[in-house]
Amino acid sequence: MIIENYFENLDVLHLGTTPPHAYFIPFSSESAAKAANPEDRGQSERFFDLCGAWQFRWYENVRLLKDAFWTPDFLRSGFTSVQVPAVWQNYGVDQHQYTNINYPFPYDPPYVPAQNPCGAYLRDFTFSPEPNRRYLLNFEGVDSAFYLWLNGKFVGYSQVSHSTSEFDVTKLLQAGQNTLAVLVLKWCDGSYFEDQDKFRMSGIFREVYLLERPYEGISDFTVTAPVLADGSGEINIEIAFFHQEVPVEGVLLSPEGTEIARQNISKGKLCFSLEQPALWNAEQPALYKLLLVCAEETIPVRVGIRNIEIKDTVVCLNGKAIKFRGVNRHESSAVNGSAVTLDEMKQDLTLMKLHNINAIRTSHYPNAPVFYELCDEMGFYVIDEADQECHGVCTQSCDYAGDTSALLAHDPRFETTILDRVQLLVERDKNHACVVIWSMGNESGYGVNFEKALYWTKQKDSTRLTHYEGASYPAKDYQPDFAPLDLYSKMYAPVQDMITYCENKPDKPFIQCEYVHAMGNSPGDIEDYYQVIEKYDTACGGFVWEWCDHAVYKGTAMNNQPIYCYGGDFGEFPHDGNFCMDGLVFPDRTPHTGLREFKNVQRPLRASFDKSGCTLTLHNIRDFTNASEFAEVHWVLERDGEPVQRGTIAPQELHIEPHGYQSFNLPLQAEEEGHFVLRVETIQHSANGALPAGHLLGVECFDLAKDGTKNLRLQQLQNTPKVAAPPVFEADDTSIIVCGNDFRYEFDPLTGVFRSMTAHNQQLITKPMEYNIWRAPTDNDRYIREKWEEIGYQRMVSRAYAPTCAVEGNDVVIRSRVSLASVARCHSLSLETEWRIAPDGTLTAKLDGARNGILPFLPRFGLRLFLPKEDSACEYFGFGPWESYCDKHQSTFLGKFIADCADMHENYLRPQENSSHFGCDYVLAGNKLLCWADRPFSFNFSRYTQEELTAKAHSYELVPNDSNVLCLDYKMSGIGSNSCGPELLPQYRFDDTQFSYTLHIKPINK
């Protein structure tokens, strides 16, 4: 090789870099710094952007690099123009690879594959350095390690992909043209600590820029802004200098931008006292602006005054108990990969605010520095996580007996590596109000190296909490020390485990750093977790895994569907398939229904309703804000989906302190007849940050139906002219044909269902009806699916025994015993069936089922009908307007909805069961078939069969069926979050061993 092998040398993590320090951008003057928007670095005259067009050449192996491309006389053969920041896989070289746990190379630390790809970058720029100035070259993110030259001179080397590397290039800059040369390696010894659950992408993926600084001036500063015991506040600043102290004046501006104090530095320190400070929290993110004014520059920094602490195992901010209603967020863009833009960050954070999210865990590395400026400003609690994950050690078995989780965590060779990654995190982000918790990393086991990193962190910064879920996996034969950890953190702990912990006098607050795994049609257990988190003060909240689906956008298919690729679509090994498609939003940030579910579970006002006194009680779950400051409450009373009364509770009527309650008497006039539902909506009454006026913050509904009352719309649809003549039938061994006034049905005595149905000169079904227990497995069915398929639930066929047919009164009645079984397997389900055909053609199916109790719970049970493709209209009364399930309907509400079959599909990128509707009174499908049951039921109306959804790997591959598929379910098992969480809770499983289902199907004359 023509370069030194630093990338496998544990003694060389950084060469030529400046010491770690706080992130800041200097400005040329006090007035410029006052006006500056911190997330727009381009406003500063001291900021020189080096992003944009670079020259690039990729090599399959660093050992194939034979020419010193960094020298001034190098002929740039084979180089092409590319944009920086970006990942080189998007330049058309190398391959994308998604792997979750397994290292994408042999486990042989500190060595990486001899076939180590690299990318050579060149950037020419014109510059005029000023005398007596210092010039600092910053790379905010390079994956995984890089060598740097300027004007042919070696500057240095650095690794740690998601942390800033800064180099003092003052002596190497020249007037006129300068050439920057960077060699980036795909792998280095640090890659063993960057085994995060994400696409592996390489290159200069964050900003590159020069900062012009005075030769003598501020090198670093630390801001602490505590709330004192008497309610006053302080802003303390400790300043470090390059070589010698220079005069510094501190200027403090109020959150409104007014100057409120000014003072000079004394012994490297400044201190501002405020008697009645505006405090920072996620709901009211008040920020002061501090200006550090020197003779040659001004450094602005925004300051939030706040305390984060633990009182009696309760996490408190500014003395008040808080809950983290959070998400885990990777830096991910379907178009840009890990090179996420400022606009994409703002889009994410705005969407989070719109969906009642108040906290973010930066899984599993520090985010771009500007991201924290946005979190400070918009109001988010951040768990800031070190660039540290060694998940691949879990798959090792060599040279070690037992759990291998702590192979690197306890290896003394990697003590410096682990400490370095934590120090880079803490030093860079220490001045951000949003950062309330330091996390040592993720899934790397626990050993003495992490203990030392935790103790260093507590010594460096006692103003924040510490977190590390990996402490659950200590090194073998080692007595772990948990003293420097402030939180007891778990992933995907079942609801009952949380209850058990909170009720057994714990010594630390409980936090779910990952929970309710949001993969595909998911999550289905948010409300269950919410109830536990709200009940126990010790449970401080959780962070959904995760925010967005990771994918690589590859254009559109012939059917105009977007092509999103995931693990395995690039021919890579190893890979973990679609396990990266596990977010609350699609790759383009379109919300999943799971995001709507999470939003509504976390709605800021919760309601309860006492029917007897028509009393609505509102509970404010916000931690700092009176309801009158944000809410207006609208209520509507509906009968059978039509509004009959409306009302508003104005902001001035709301006097609900944080965590408080207030009751209101509603003048409801519900009549006896009809299905009455009270819907309550919380509306943002005036614009506030990302929240526009009129934004829906939350909704809930109360079913006021009285026993025995019927849905009047259903009755209206049921009421057709009476038909006097009873139907007649003909029967033989292969068919039972029932004919009546304007209808003809053919029953199959071998399968126990109807083969064809026509009425009013219209074809009602296009192929035989089916008993149905299968659903296209959701991602959360990934484990139970194996059992389902072993039993053969996906290929069940029905067999009828000894069918009988007779006229009883005015009806024809067909009875039989039916079994459902698959090839090579015994019966899974036995039915006693009765089909009653009325003179007007109404079918009434009474199905008494007995499930084989030793088999796994059923995905569903019901009937499947195939309707003509042109019959696509749908009206229903149930939980809508989007998909709903027994454990996933908090964001929906009871009402009457009208939709088209084509619009009822939720287009998950890996196809699966979707768009069922729970708790229905009726469905009118295709304006032809009216269906209802003797109890609320579920239905699905889709262009796709469950077989098609099961078979296809990508949404763009789906082919609509020739018929519209109507599933009428007695019950559908819940959704849960078992793709990476606990098993589906028992109350949501269809594990009844005995059940009875009475379903009615009536033809309607269009």
Image (cartoon, grey):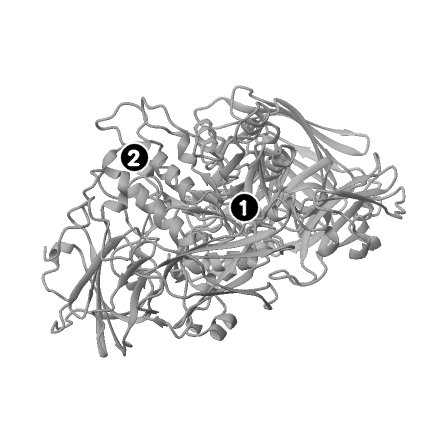
Q: Which amino acid does label 1 sit on?
A: Gly
Q: What is the crowding at mark 1: few (fewer than 14 residues within 10 Å), some, or many (at least 20)? A: many
- The foreground one among 872 and 503 is 503
Which residue is disc 2 drawn over?
393
The C terminus, quarter of image: bottom right
- The foreground one among 414 and 270 is 270
Q: In which quarter of the image is residue 172?
A: bottom left
Q: What element carries label 2?
A: helix
Which residue is disc 1 drawn over?
326
**Could you tell which of marks 1 and 2 lies nearer the N-terminus?**
1
Residue sitting at x 10%, y 58%: 2
Report the label total.
2
- Please state the horizontal and vertical placement of residue 904, each as a whole percent of the image: 60, 52
Q: In this view, does 663 lie to the left or right of 803?
A: right
Q: What is the crowding at mark 2: few (fewer than 14 residues within 10 Å), some, or many (at least 20)? A: many
Q: In this view, does 948 lie to the left or right of 725?
A: left
Residue sitting at x 39%, y 40%: 442
Q: In which quarter of the image is residue 177?
A: bottom left
Residue that extends furthest to the top in the rendered view of this protein? 854
Q: Separation of disc 1 and disc 2 at Cα? A: 28 Å
